[in-house]
């Protein structure tokens, strides 16, 4: 299936070439939420996209656009690209004009996400012993990206997001996640109550992170299936949801402001992933 | 010492009024590193600045500029402002024109930092049982802000930064820290080797966070004086420094990318702060 990388390169000489229109329209918000297409940038993220595609994780690489002087260093990745996916190459002037100066890292891809049809079907794919992060109302791309990065680092099986969360495939979110938004399977949509209901039906213990949680994190021991529920900063999780789940608080110094939500997810994941044998043996 | 807030307000009608020149010049980088003056914005940050001033933490509030419709809600804070500090008030048109649309939150202050003369003198001020974060080569304001926020949340006594770290009093860093850059005493300057040397002379055990650290974090128990050393992302801490200190690794899933440095500081601080009795009793 491999192919000489040089033989498949398609040179682009005009920044307005319609074949690279998706890239020229991408200035940050443009592609977010438009169908399920997204822009992936940089070597690490392209690698994550190819890995996800190969692992059957519902991603398709549709187009690749490379700065000419990045081709040689990316030849290992180009060799993995499906023969049906075009690989365009352009010089710096063309790429800067097409995409915007400093808007790229010389490696750009258009990907497509084929999400699971329903949350229930998504949860059906998870293993018997499962660790999930459930994110609710996270509107900040740094925080979404950080949550995915932490989910990847600590070996979580999936992230589920309510419909009020921002898109983890938005460029900045992918970048902050260091590609984990493509590596960690996710499903997005519905209300918090929908998420909590579906997780419960699938046998998950649901632990809501809250500064006013009843149980201290350090003494918490998860069972076989755990969903860590993280809410928006400021407001936190709604009271009616906190009433329906068990709640954990990350012990902190008295009288201080609360943690950033992505950092809180990292602390909680470190603790529970150790208990669930997701991290290296001690 | 309190004063009727209304009586001390100085109206500003011209965006070019020289009395508010520091604010009009502040578009992000301008004040960073210029002497020791900085811009603080928003109610939470102004409160942190007033608290720090009151607690003798080497900060001076020099000027305050308020959007007229924020005066009433900020009257408790205005009442705490030193009588020598001018309090300017402007309408939205004037403030937007002076400072830039959406560049303010209706509450802006010019502060001045009076740093400790030397690192040794700074370390002399710390209590016998002490927890310090030592940051090296952190060039990203989000990460510096995040490290300070975590230091505050977990009751660390101080942050020390080598000279290659960015300024924690840069606007975005203060904002991300939610004011902790003003609440947690800090000292910045010198090389990593200087930091490590001074901390050792002051009786600190120095634990470097590194994905290749020899001891797993979960089994680490700190002594009376601990400095958690966090290096830049990507490169990490230099090898010659890692050879001179004990090293901790945050256990993670095999084969994954490493944590964000601010998140890593949060996980390590949560663990050691509990051991050192800095968090709520369990």
Image (cartoon, coloured by chain):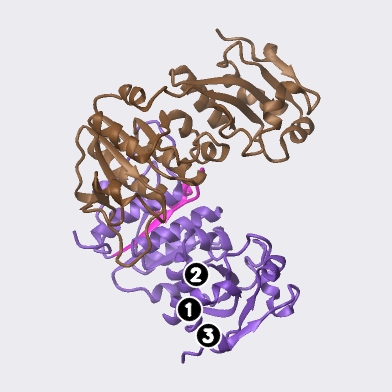
Chain colours: A brown, B purple
Q: Disc 1 marks which residue?
A: B77
In this rendered view, identify the residue nearer to me: A57 or A35.
A35
Q: Are marks 3 and 1 in contact (CB under 8 Å)?
A: no
Is residue B214 at least partly visible in the picture?
Answer: no
Q: Earlier in the sequence, mark 1 or mark 2?
A: 2
Q: Chain of mark 2?
A: B
Residue B163 left/right relative to B270: right
Asked whether A168 falls inside the magenta stretch, the response is no
Residue A26: where, in percent of width, then height? 66, 34
Question: Mark 3 and mark 1, same subunit?
Answer: yes
Q: Residue at x 68, y 13 (%)?
A: A8
Q: Name the residue tied to disc 2.
A: B43
Q: Which residues are magenta?
A: B225-246
Q: CA distance from mark 2 to mark 3?
A: 16 Å
Q: Is residue B202 left or right of residue B187?
A: left
- Is A87 positioned to the left or the right of A244 in the image? right
Is residue A124 in sight in this rendering?
yes
Mark nearer the N terminus (3 vs 1): 3
Q: CA distance from mark 1 to mark 2?
A: 8 Å
Find the distance from the CA under tag 3 to the CA under tag 1: 9 Å
Q: Which residue is mark 3?
A: B5
Residue A71 occupies quadrant = top right
């Amino acid at each position: 299936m491999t192919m000489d990388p040089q033989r498949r390169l398609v040179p682009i000489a005009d920044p307005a070439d319609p074949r690279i229109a998706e890239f020229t329209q991408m200035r940050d918000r443009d592609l977010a939420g438009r169908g399920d297409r997204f822009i992936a940038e940089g070597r690490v993220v392209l690698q994550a996209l190819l890995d996800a595609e190969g692992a059957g994780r519902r991603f398709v690489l549709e187009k690749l656009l490379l700065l000419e002087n990045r081709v040689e260093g990316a030849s290992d990745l180009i060799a993995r690209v499906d023969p049906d996916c075009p690989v365009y190459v352009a010089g710096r002037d063309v790429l800067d004009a097409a995409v915007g100066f400093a808007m790229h890292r010389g490696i750009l891809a258009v990907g497509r996400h084929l999400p699971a049809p329903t949350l229930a079907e998504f949860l059906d794919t998870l293993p018997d012993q499962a660790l999930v992060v459930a994110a609710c109302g996270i509107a900040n791309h740094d925080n979404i990206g950080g949550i995915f990065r932490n989910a990847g680092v600590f070996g979580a099986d999936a992230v589920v997001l309510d419909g009020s969360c921002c898109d983890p495939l938005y460029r900045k979110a992918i970048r902050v996640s260091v590609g984990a938004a493509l590596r960690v399977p996710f499903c997005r949509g519905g209300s918090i109550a929908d998420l909590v209901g579906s997780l419960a039906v699938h046998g998950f213990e649901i632990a809501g992170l809250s500064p006013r949680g009843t149980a201290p994190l350090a003494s918490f021991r998860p069972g076989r299936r755990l969903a860590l529920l993280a809410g928006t900063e400021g407001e936190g999780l709604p009271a009616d949801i906190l009433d329906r789940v068990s709640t954990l608080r990350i012990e902190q110094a008295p009288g201080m402001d609360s943690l950033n939500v992505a950092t809180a997810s990292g602390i909680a994941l470190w603790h529970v992933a150790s208990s669930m044998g997701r991290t290296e043996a001690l």
